[in-house]
């Protein structure tokens, strides 16, 4: 693969000796226009990489917060077509911030793999995280994605041992996503000491950056993780910031976009202080 926006961003951060803040939001939550405004403002708020969730009705690796975000988005009419349109709209004003689509294989398969990869590359997608496509099925989506110039990012977990790790990272590109806790998103806080040991374990097997997610909610937690990892992923806390800003009918209010961006700014400040 040619160098991507992901590669360029992590190279720049390495030169600064700073970890990345990777922010996850669900596309279309709570509605298309509000979601687009949130995404457009993430880089200015401090996000280095954006993970954009592809809403799906059965998100088996996600906790309640992201499950509800997906339901809100689907109820508001979010589709894969609209998710890719959101990326295209974002790219009109930002051609540098990496965008990674994250989710499950079913919506991609339903869209059509080749059609999806062609449209995603044209929209400006830089990477994919598809949690239910294992390395044994690399021919299905991983290798075709790379042929389209899209990084395929794999997840390593606390149960990924030394025998399994080489297979997991064999065709991984962009970065490795280390899941800091065993379980679903947003339910447990990571242990920084354990995370540091596992990050070192993953780094012993690959030169790729290692980003850590699942359970990071506060600037203090982000800073602790950023001391060992190349990136800190925050998702559930951000989608909860969306939910708690909605009125009694589930509609976005004046504080929805600003509230998410304020939290991102606080998290970015924590990450920035981690190695000082």
Image (cartoon, helix red, strand yellow):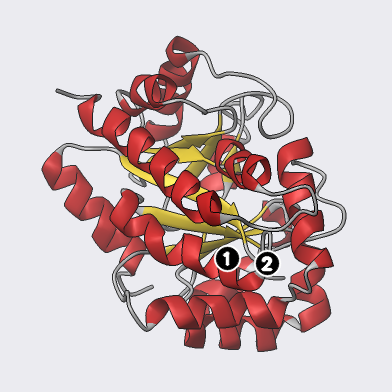
Residue matched to label 1:
34
Say which quadrant the N terminus sits in.
bottom left
Q: In this view, does 154 lie above or below 89?
A: above
- In this rendered view, identify the residue nearer to me: 2 or 66: 66
10 Å neighbourhood of mark 1: few (<14), some, or many (≥20)? some
- In this rendered view, identify the residue nearer to me: 167 or 223: 223
For residue 226, which quarter of the picture? top left
Residue 148 seen anywhere in this rendered image of the structure = no
10 Å neighbourhood of mark 2: few (<14), some, or many (≥20)? some
Residue 258 percent across, percent down from the top left: 44, 51
Q: What element carries label 2?
A: loop
Say which quadrant the C terminus sits in.
top left
Q: In this view, does 173 lie above or below 268?
A: below
For residue 188, which quarter of the picture? top right
- In this rendered view, identify the residue nearer to me: 182 or 264: 264
Residue 246 seen anywhere in this rendered image of the structure = yes
For residue 273, which quarter of the picture? top left
The residue positioned 71% from the left and 49% from the top of the image is 247
Q: Is mark 1 on a helix, strand or loop?
A: helix
- In this rendered view, identify the residue nearer to me: 237 or 194: 237
Say left or right for 134 vs 119.
right
Residue 216 percent across, percent down from the top left: 52, 28
The residue positioned 74% from the left and 27% from the top of the image is 183
Residues tagged 1 and 2 counted as in contact (Cβ below 8 A): yes
Residue 67 percent across, percent down from the top left: 78, 46
Say left or right for 199 vs 215.
left
Q: Distance between the residues labelled 1 and 2?
A: 6 Å
Residue 250 percent across, percent down from the top left: 76, 54
Residue matched to label 2:
31
The residue positioned 51% from the left and 76% from the top of the image is 87
Say left or right for 12 vs 165.
left
Numbered circle sitting on residue 21: none
């Amino acid at each position: 693969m040619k160098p991507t926006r992901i590669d360029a961003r992590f190279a720049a951060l390495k030169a600064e000796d700073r970890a990345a803040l990777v922010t996850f939001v669900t596309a279309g939550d709570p509605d298309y226009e509000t979601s687009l405004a949130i995404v457009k403002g993430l880089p200015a708020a401090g996000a280095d990489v954006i993970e954009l969730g592809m809403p799906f009705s059965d998100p088996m690796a996600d906790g309640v917060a992201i499950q509800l975000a997906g339901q809100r988005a689907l109820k508001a009419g979010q589709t894969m077509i609209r998710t890719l349109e959101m990326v295209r709209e974002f790219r009109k004003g930002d051609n540098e911030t990496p965008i990674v689509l994250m989710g499950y294989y079913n919506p991609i398969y339903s869209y059509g793999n080749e059609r999806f990869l062609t449209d995603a590359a044209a929209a400006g997608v830089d990477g994919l995280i598809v949690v239910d496509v294992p390395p044994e099925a690399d021919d299905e989506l991983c290798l075709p994605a790379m042929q389209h110039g899209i990084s395929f990012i794999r997840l390593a977990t606390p149960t990924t041992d030394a025998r399994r790790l080489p297979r997991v990272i064999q065709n991984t590109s962009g970065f490795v996503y280390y899941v800091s806790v065993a379980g679903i998103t947003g339910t447990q806080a990571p242990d920084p000491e354990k995370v540091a040991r596992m990050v070192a374990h993953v780094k012993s097997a690959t030169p790729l950056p290692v980003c850590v997610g699942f359970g990071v909610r506060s600037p203090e937690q982000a800073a602790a993780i950023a001391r060992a990892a190349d990136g800190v992923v925050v998702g559930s806390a951000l989608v909860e910031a969306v939910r708690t800003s909605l009125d009694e009918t589930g509609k976005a209010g004046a504080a929805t976009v600003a509230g998410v961006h304020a939290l991102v700014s606080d998290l970015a400040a924590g990450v920035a202080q981690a190695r000082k």
